[in-house]
Amino acid sequence: MADRPDEPNGKPAAGNGDGKPPEEQADINKLLRASSGLPEGKLEAVEPRRAGVVTKVRDPAVALAERARAEFEGYKDPQQTQLWKSIFRVSHDRSDPRNRSLAVLSNVFLHLHPAKINRDAVRYNFTWGMGGITFYLFIVLTFTGVLLMYYYHPVKVQAFKDILYLEHDVPFGKLLRNMHRWAAHLMVITTWLHMFRVVLTGSYKRPREFNWCVGVVLLVLTLLLSFTGYLLPDDQLGFWAVTVGTNMARATPLLGHEGPFGPQLGMTPFNDVRFGLLGGSIVDANALLRSYIWHCIGIPLVASIFMAVHFWRIRKDGGISGPAPVMLDSEMKPLRK
Amino acid sequence: MAMAIPRPRGASRKWVWLIVAVVVVGALALMVQDWHQLWKISSTPDNIPIVAMIPLVVFFTWLGFKQSRANDELIERLEADPQAAKTAHRKTLPWRPGWARELHVWPYLVRIEFMAALIVTIVLFVWSITLNAPLEEPANPNLTMNPSKAPWYFLGLQEMLVYFDPWIAGVVMPSLLIIGLMVFPYVDSNPLGNGYYSWRQRRFATGMFMWGFYMWIILIIIGTFIRGPGWIWFWPGQTWDHNAVVFDRNRDLHEIIAGWGLTKLNVYPWKAIFGGIVVGSFYLVGGLFFHWLMKRAQMSRETFRSWANFKRWATVPGELEMKILQRTSILQYLTFQFFAISILLAFPVKLLLRLLFTIKYVWVTPWFNI
């Protein structure tokens, strides 16, 4: 019986020690009573109470400590905690292929990827990583751009001062502006190189023709994003670059007041397409505001939609195009009529 | 007697190339009069991207063509051996039976993406710490910047303004460029080379794109390094003279011809009709040129060995090229021709007419000039 502590009557007896059988315990009590010289019944009243206090305090404490130790052991593996499991649904067990797939499929940021890809598709010699880097730069630009927006007023009297403030007083303001600028330039370069790679690998071919067109739109939007941002510091550089750029719009056929057939259709500097772009006949306060809205809200929104389509279609067209097995000239099938 | 050590052929050629490169660079360096001016242009913060872009484009062209060459050799080998073509692994990348065909994205792709993001971030930090974004004086409509340049990626368009009226350079050309890029996959009727680098199988399509791509970059280089105050042509290394004036006798084509005795060309409607004929024949000749070009077989060293070989190359169409042409629909063919002539050919032709022959317009009408 002593080796079964979970026995119901084993526990209370444990007060004076070692879980002896009840009849033996009664004998001991009798002996104690005799030696103490107290009247009958008194001992009964005192002894159990004393044993009870010790028991009540020590036993749960020991049990609690035991539980805490066991629980603490559990915390040594954070992946087994409720908190962890509520965030990450999948164990990070590398040996289980199912987990590796689920790691991608159950993650909103990674689920644009398939679970598995062609073993050669991870070669960066093939992709140059330019599409992914372009997207990453868009994220960097969004992040730094939002931070810049906290310090910038698209108002003629304030814009240039804001840039000075940003450069000289805001902690890390100069770094922030530099990073936004250079990331934008880099994004133009990576977009072009991405397009170049897609041509060299023939990745625009069936079934990806439409996605190429989406990509061309994204290229144009990238250039426009960069261009609309150029005016925002409201310095000579941006002002004249945008003046030169938008002056071309005067010459739009039909819609510009200096373009072919423009004047015949009633175009003047105050109602033509350039006026619409600038919100005026010269690059001024309205142009600054329009540029700002296009740069921070309009074009990024449109670009995000096109990006979503671009990435989605890459998945739907079976991932990136290669490196595919080569086809031979002699295998070119005659065109189906 | 010492044994003559056979030297690999490539090694000696490398030396020749190196010497040629040194001589060329040395000659160019001697032509530079004003190093300070050159440095000032190249180190302008906003020009750094284009300075960086030139070696990047060269590097990635090399990287692409290296892989094209490997694939082309494989294709050639398999084409010569139909039995091997049935069983061979059709990639130049290593492969062993038993290897898994697919990899898990987690971690094999995700870790590459992570590393790429990390490297780009580091590059951006270093770039941003070492180089400040430009900030000029506050905008002043009364003080014109000279030269007043667009951002570098639009300098191609600004350079076009020299050769065409603004409605063409600023509106029509960019639109054609965008639409031309969009129709590109639809006019390429060649099913080969889908998803792998190859030059041999798609020389014409790749070549046409690269023609446009490099033209765009060359225009940007001209706009960045060559155009100075007043948008005047200063060679790299020449001092930008703010007082320079160029006395170009820019004339229209019909004026030159009229000077030869056909005085009627100076008046309407003959002036306009003459220009129309010139532009029309340009499209005709351009069309014939592209038609000839798209049928050409690959050049080899043999092509230049003898005149007969060259003549054969120039007159006998390539087999693969003819097969591709037969797959091309009439609509595809005409669409391609239109964009190729209007952008790829019109632009360099007008550039040369202007820079070499100082011709301003070839077609003058009361409504528009080209």
Image (cartoon, rainbow, N blue to C red):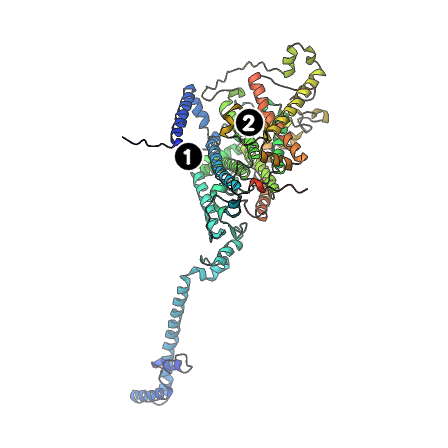
Q: How many marks?
A: 2
Q: Which quadrant: the N terminus of chain B? A: top left
Q: Position of residue A106 (x, y in %)?
A: 53, 55
Badge 1 is on which residue? B130
Q: Position of residue B277 (x, y in %)?
A: 68, 20
Establish if A58 lies above or below B132.
below
Establish if A172 lies above or below B35.
below
Question: Residue at 55% across / 34% down in the picture?
Answer: B203
Q: Is residue B238 left or right of residue A279?
A: left
* A131 and A95: which is toward the camera: A95
* B197 and A137: which is toward the camera: B197
Q: Position of residue A169 (x, y in %)?
A: 45, 37
Crowding near pointer 1: few (<14 within 10 Å), some, many (20+)? Answer: few
* A29 and A139: which is toward the camera: A139
What is the chain identity of the residue bearing mark 1? Answer: B
Quarter location, residue B140: top right
Answer yes or no: is residue A154 visible. Answer: no
Residue A240 marker = 2
Q: Which quadrant: the C terminus of chain B? A: top right
* A319 and B48: which is toward the camera: A319
Answer yes or no: is residue B81 visible. Answer: yes
Circle 1: element type: helix
Crowding near pointer 2: few (<14 within 10 Å), some, many (20+)? Answer: many
- Which amino acid type corresponds to the residue marked 1 in the rendered image? Thr
- Which amino acid type corresponds to the residue marked 2 in the rendered image? Trp
Q: Are marks 1 and 2 on the same chain?
A: no
Circle 2: element type: helix
What is the chain identity of the residue bearing mark 2? Answer: A
Q: Return the residue found at the far left.
A: B1
Quarter location, residue B173: top right
Q: Position of residue B36 (x, y in %)?
A: 42, 22
